[in-house]
Every structure is written in structure tokens, then in C-alpha cells.
Amino acid sequence: MDKKENVYRLLNVSLPFLIGVHIFFNPFPQLTAIQEISFYGSVLILIVLLSLRKTTFSFKTPLTTPFILFVLWAGVGLFFALNKTNTIHDIYAHLLKYLMVFFLLVNYFNSVKYFEILRNLIILSTAVFASYLLIYFYFILGKPFDVKLGYIMAWEIPSNFISVLTIFALLLTLNIYNFNGLKIYKLIGLLPASILIFTTLATKTRAAILALPIAVVVCFIANKKMMAVFLVSILLIVSLMPVGDRFTPKDLASKLSTDDRGNIWYTFWEIIKEHPVTGIGYGIQTYDDDNFLHKYNQRVPSLYRQPVPHRSPHNFYVDITVRMGFVGLSIFIFTIYQMLWMARDIMKCSRNRFVKKWALCLIAALLAWLIQAFFESLVSGPTAMIFFIILAMMTILWNLREETEYQPEGLSAK
């Protein structure tokens, strides 16, 4: 009996460990084998423990209703999908799997201790990933520092995607400065913070450089001193890096006149007009049909028509509307509403200062993600996973909102 209990304990420990491994390797796109093994390993252990009644697992959260509605509507869209095979694949690979990770995090990282472990995993993995990109691009490949950090040969990660990862990890790093105490951890945090800021600015993406200061303001809205420190620091780093030329009046005017995003959205708007309710199906590969895109591009007035239609809307909201119609977009907005409702409930009702401080940080992280989503289709891969991690972390805090005030040793909110 003791041996069996030891096995059960080992399985219960292994489950969050494998989830942590999955989260740690999220930024690394070429290490999908490790992610797959860790994901399916955790699901298998969960099934075993549930069958033996050695663990509990709940799907009850404020976000469960919008999640169910989103999945059901994606399923309804399957009947109208232009590429049914790919739609079935993407509903599973780019929706259900992300939702399973969400519920695994909510169930097995549902304590202050595990919340901190999750935060540290994200910071460490993203800092390691960012360091690799910087060293490989600027030192091994020998690219000048004024070259935009973007596609890295086999890694193939767009600049806008890199900055989504780094800004989230950066906010998790900076939020510790909203607390008193733990001076040694604040000093240690300067290293990943510096790496993440430098990497974010090296992408030279306007979406990131717009989202970053806004997110910092929200994160430190109740701590004006630290807000000023970090905003000035960011401005100083911007002035020292070859990024400022991206925000001169001449460059902005040139960008507005030459940016083809408006033309891209115009083409996809023609698709939305023909499929406003159910969309064209959840499958992303529908965009790979050149004849399909050409058909709608030809409907655009010649002044705004693309010479060669882009295969991506370069806008998350347009992307969701094209693939799931306005109903799908409305359900997504409902999901955001529920997330903000949880945050409001925490800020209004909770007496746990630790929880409230981190809830504000996650609001800032969500806002940064939503801003960057205007400029890129963040519907799959590591950037989509970030969205579900943010939701999971807020849900964990919401579950902890009524607990007795607890702070890690040496840590107290200002």
C-alpha cells in the first residue's frame, strides 16, 4: 500500500512538473517535440489519477462559459468551413490544446507558491530565449545593431511575435518592484529585465514600442515613483539604440503612406462581407489558397488592391472575424469582459495585497497583448499560448482572492 501511495505522490508531483516544462519551452518553436511529450504526458497522468480518484480536476471558472461558446461556435463553423480537414485540425491543435493547458495551470498551479513558480518559469525561459536570439543574430551572424531583430534563419520568428513574448515576461519581471523587501531579488531581476527590454526594442516594431510604455503605466499606476523610473529608463535605452528613427515625423509619415496593412484588411473585409456570421472556418490553411484570396482581392478598388494578396490579415481581430464571423469576435470580446470582471472583483473585494498587485500586472499584460494583436495575427503558436497563460494566471489569482493575507517571506505590498 505504501508503495502505491508513493507512486501516486510521484504522479501528482510529475503532473505540474510536466506542465511547467511545457510552459518553459513555449518560446522555443523548434523544440515542439519536448512540448508535445510534456503536454501529452501531463494529460496521460491526469487521466490515470482521475481514474484512480487520486486527484481532483475542475472546469469551473468564470471563463468556462465563453470558452464553451467559442468551441461550440468553432464547431458550428465546421459545417460552413471552406477547408474542413484543416478546420478540424486547428480546432484541436490551436484551440482545445490551449484550453487544456489553461485548465491544467488553473488546477495545478493554484497557490501562491505555484503562481510564483509559473512566473519565474516564464521569466527565465523568455530571458534565455531572448539571449539566444541576440547572441545568434548580432554576434554569430554578425548583423549590425541597427538591423531589425526578426527572422533568424531556421527559427523564423517574426519581430512582432518576439516582442509579444518579451513584453509579457518583462512585465512579470518588473512587477516585483511594486513590492517592498526582497532587495536581492530585485537586483537579480535587473539582468532579465535588461535583456528583455533590449530584445523588445531590437525588434523595432511600432506595436511593441507603443504597447510597452502603456503597459508599464498600467502596471505601476499606484506606484508613480517606479513608473517614472522605468519610463525614463526605457526612453534612455531608446535614445541609445537605433530605434528612434522609427518615430520621427518623416518616418511615421512614410510608414502611413507605404504600410500595406490597410490594403490587406480591405481584402479580408471583402471575405467578411460574404461570410459575416459563421466565417470561413477555423482552419488557418484556408488562407493558403491563392485563387481564394485573388477572388476577393479583385473586389477591392484598384487604388487599394494588393499586387499579390497577403496570406495573413496581420490583425488578430480581423483574423478571428474572417474565420469565425462576427459571432466569434463577440465571444472573444465576452472572454475579455470576463477576464476584466475577475480583475475588478479582485481589486474591489480581495484583501490580499499580493493578489491585487499581480492582478494589476496581468491587466497590463493583457492590454499589451491586445494592442500588439492589432498588428499581427496572434492566433496560434507561442503568442497565442501567452494569451491563455495570462487568462490562467488571472483565474488563479481570482481563486486566491478570499484567502487569508499571505506574502512570500520578506515580501510586502506597498
Image (cartoon, rainbow, N blue to C red):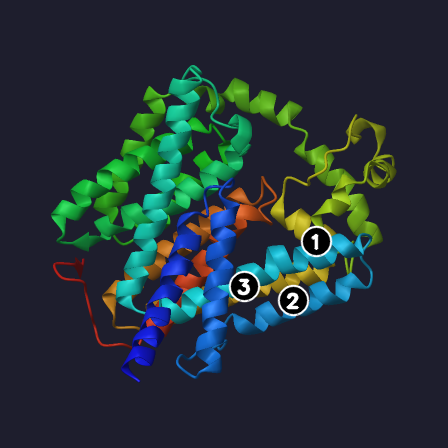
Instruction: Tell me: residue 105, above or below residue 165.
Output: below
Instruction: Tell me: residue 24, above or below residue 101.
Output: above
Comparing 144 with 361, the one in front is 144
Residue at (59% x, 20% y) in the render: 254
User: Horizontal and vertical percent for residue 259?
Assistant: 64, 27
Counting residues from the start of the chain, the first of labels 2 and 3 encountered is: 2
Whole-Å distance between the Cαs marked 1 and 2? 15 Å
Examine the image and state in which quarter residue 241 appears. top left
Residue topped by disc 1 = 321
Instruction: Tell me: residue 26, above or below residue 351.
Output: above
User: Horizontal and vertical percent for residue 68?
Assistant: 61, 71
Instruction: Tell me: residue 405, above or below residue 220.
Output: below
Whether residue 171 is visible, yes or no, is: no
Residue at (46% x, 41% y) in the render: 28
Residue topped by disc 2 = 71
Q: Quick one: SS at disc 1?
A: helix
Whole-Å distance between the Cαs marked 1 and 3? 20 Å
User: Horizontal and vertical percent for residue 361?
Assistant: 35, 54
Residue topped by disc 3 = 99
Q: Quick one: SS at disc 2?
A: helix
Whole-Å distance between the Cαs marked 2 and 3? 10 Å
- Specify the amino acid type for callout 2: Val
Q: Are marks 2 and 3 in contact (CB under 8 Å)?
A: yes
Residue at (45% x, 53% y) in the render: 366
Q: Quadrant of the C terminus?
A: bottom left
